[in-house]
Image (cartoon, rainbow, N blue to C red):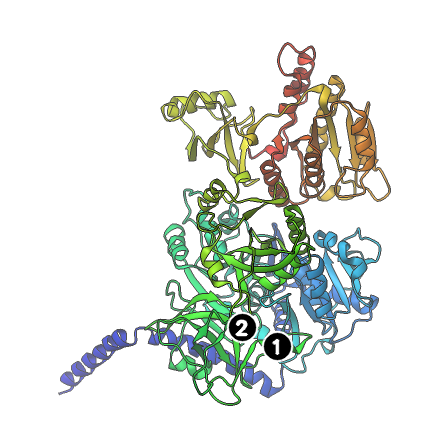
Amino acid sequence: MLLPWLTGLAAGIGFLHFLQKLVFPYFWDDFWYLLKVVRYGIRLEMYVLKGELFTVLDKFLSLAKKQPQKPFIIYEGDIYTYQDVDKRSSRVAHVFLNHSTLKRGDTVALLMSNEPDFVHVWFGLAKLGCVVAFLNSNIVSNSLLHCIRSCEPRALVVGADLLGTIEEILPRIPEGISVWAMSDSVPRGVISLKEKMRTASDKPVARSHHVASSLRSTHVYIFTSGTTGLPKAAVITQMQTLKGSAGLWAFGCTANDIIYITLPLYHSSGALLGIGGCIELGATCVLKKKFSASHFWNDCRKYNVTVFQYIGELCHYLCKQPKREGEKDHQVRLAVGNGLRSDVWREFLDRFGNIKMCEFYGATEGNICLMNHNGKIGSVGRTNFLHKLLFTFDLIKYDVQKDEPIRNEQGWCIPVKKGEPGLLISRVTENNPFFGYAGNKKHTEKKLLCDVFKKGDVYFNTGDLMVQDQENFLYFWDRIGDTFRWKGENVATTEVADVIGMLDFIQETNVYGVVVPDYEGKAGMASITLKPNKSLDLEKVYEQVVSFLPAYACPRFLRIQGKMETTGTFKLQKCHLVEEGFSPLKISDPLYFMDNLKKSYVPLSKELYDQIIGGAGAPSGTVPVLFCFSVFARPSSVPHGAGYELLIQKFLSLYGDQIDMHRKFVVQLFAEEWGQYVDLPKGFAVSERCKVRLVPLQIQLTTLGNLTPSSTVFFCCDMQERFRPAIKYFGDIISVGQRLLQGARMLGIPVIVTEQYPKGLGSTVQEIDLTGVKLVLPKTKFSMVLPEVEAALAEIPGVRSVVLFGVETHVCIQQTALELVGRGIEVHIVADATSSRSMMDRMFALERLARTGIIVTTSEAVLLQLVADKDHPKFKEIQNLIKASAPESGLLSKV
């Protein structure tokens, strides 16, 4: 009798399991995930009931004792253990304890790029019970001043690389705010935090300074991207910080994971989910200053990364990289982030392997978070009856034209049906509060909807349209109101319009986002009407937007209208403008495109439109390619170390029938160090595999220029005495520079030398043979086109070309080069004699310079071009100079 019962029971269980998979396929996924969330919530409540308010900082301090030698942050190859970060943050705390009047509850603004010191300063101030306001490192001028004023800080801490941004507004910073910099060299009125930290104690700070009185007390301010105007300081409480730090754990990360963080720490994703998440797990993070698509997978392999954070644009850029062998050869198992499009999601998985993409949704200041723990492609999360018990949210009908929710005859909002887009709103309750923004209460009130479904109820307005499918998965649809997203940032149309409206010839400005094929988000476009009897100055418009707006907020397109259309409620009409986009085929109004090379807006012709639609982005950045090899395998007949001529010969023998032979071309190699193609130097050593392409010589970017001894000046620019230990390959610059200066003496070419040193000219200049140098002077500005330099150039008849080399490529050399080009001078940058403190900065600077028409070359190419051919009387001397002292610059070692 027992056997039939057991058989029936097994059959019943099997049938129920089949029925559950058929009717409720996601039941167990949802159940275990929600159980995890409930467990975490209970744990927090138990802390509160026991009177033990355990914050993220407390968790970090306990880990510093429990696992002091475990790596916490890996940055540019350097390892910072939990103990290291604890001690250095304590030094920060002791500096402010002993050298300032900061007290518990005071606000300190932090303007710093991604670097370990961001965490040291954040935690050091938190140890004093201070509220830290994270400032967006991209914003400048009035927007930055607004952010500083709105959070009312007692002090401002600035990273060394952002000191220039602060110097511009230093006189306008409100009184009573002390300015500190993580740099030894600081301008007047700024205190060196770095200097004082050297002598500060690293002993623990008394817990009484930072013990939390409530989990609802403010921990940090994180600025929103200004979706309804200028950036607003969102209040982030200790409770919100704890919830944010649990995100990685909720998705299944563990203490053994290594998390790769390239997102900016001034955003909640980088700081709370990334750094906070590592602390919640007790894990290690690899922190990058900036995201680099070309270095991403190499870093993942180098540091054994298992989890990375993303935004949709990041994955899109990775998919746009040229394909390489072994792209699935890594240990990454999870990726956590938001904004990933379905098509990019699929392409990413197909190309890079079985990585679980953990998509989530949440506004910095919001009281709602959705997490896609099921892995459904394109979805930001899933809801069910259990989820609804914990998180009350709805999708309601929204009138996009009127920019307001649709209400019925009784005045209540109307829920949408499944499959229809609706505005996502989240109910504000005692257990699910909305803390709003610092300062003006009106900003907080504007984010709330009242009397939604009944009298007295209050909901947080996310500003996002969502769609819920039949399986209860939610999908992002669009942003509403005066905002769009570009380059991973929200752009406030009102802020952009206000900046353009400051120009005296502008009557009205209507700003909106337009879709550009093959680009994430929407590019900015401004529709403008002019004041009567006023003319349009495109250069002034360009200067205005780049001076007062972050780069991502500058409108890429302009449209000039005779009259601005409005809605029935007198709001500026946007919908049909968005639909028409920027096509000159549809629009009869004058259209213009932002040209960063000409520093102006230029007419948007059909040809330019076709280039943009085709993915070129801008005409100045296009390079016609005759033939491209994403992976060029070294032929067995070509030996290691074979020269340039032999490579070209073999190139043509293999592929000559596919190349237009009568055209002149140059062979270029993709240099990993620079992240760009460079002309192959003659000393090129053929490797096993490389990326090469053939480019026509007829285009401007590959022209060799017009170097002649009678019309050329050598400029040894900004030798950086005071930063010498931090400059990579400094010795190479001295060595290659000496060769160039010796060649200049042989050919009678004038030379100008400048150096940055607080006390004038230092020992670096003494190392250089200055015989015959026309001008030697200390550097005083970013651009070295100083009055003395201009006077020296004016004294030399017929100057057409300047050969630049030195250090700080991304600042001084770049600024100097651009100003010289603006004066009509042809500029040559010597790649094997230029460097920076950061190779990444150097890479982007050289790329920008090349796209500006500046010639990026090598010292040997410069010297040989100056003698032109073997008949030149100095040819033998120059040849012997090259043979006798041909330094192998580390700057070209990977080329």
**Quadrant in the picture for residue 820:** top right
Q: Nearer the viewer, residue 417 or 863?
A: 417
Q: Nearer the viewer, residue 500 or 387?
A: 500
**Residue at the right extreme, as displayed:** 759
665 w.r.t. 294: above or below? above
> Where is residue 522 shown, x and y percent of the image?
50, 57
Q: Earlier in the sequence, mark 1 or mark 2?
A: 1
Would you call the spot at circle 2 few (<14 residues within 10 Å), some (14-19), or many (20 or more)?
Answer: few
Specify whether 71 is left or right of 192.
left
> Where is residue 68 shown, x and y percent of the image?
63, 64
Specify whether 507 is left or right of 33.
right
Callout in the foreground (1, 2): 2
Q: Residue at x 71, y 34 (%)?
A: 823
**Quadrant in the picture for residue 795:** top right
Q: Does any portion of residue 672 appear in the rendered image?
A: no
731 w.r.t. 261: above or below? above
Q: Residue at x 73, y 68 (%)?
A: 149
| Pointer 2 residue | 569
Q: Nearer the viewer, residue 21 or 587?
A: 587
| Pointer 1 residue | 444
Q: Amino acid at mark 1?
A: Thr
798 w.r.t. 893: above or below? above
Q: Amino acid at mark 2?
A: Thr
Q: Residue at x 86, y 42 (%)?
A: 759
Assign a secondary structure to mark 1. helix
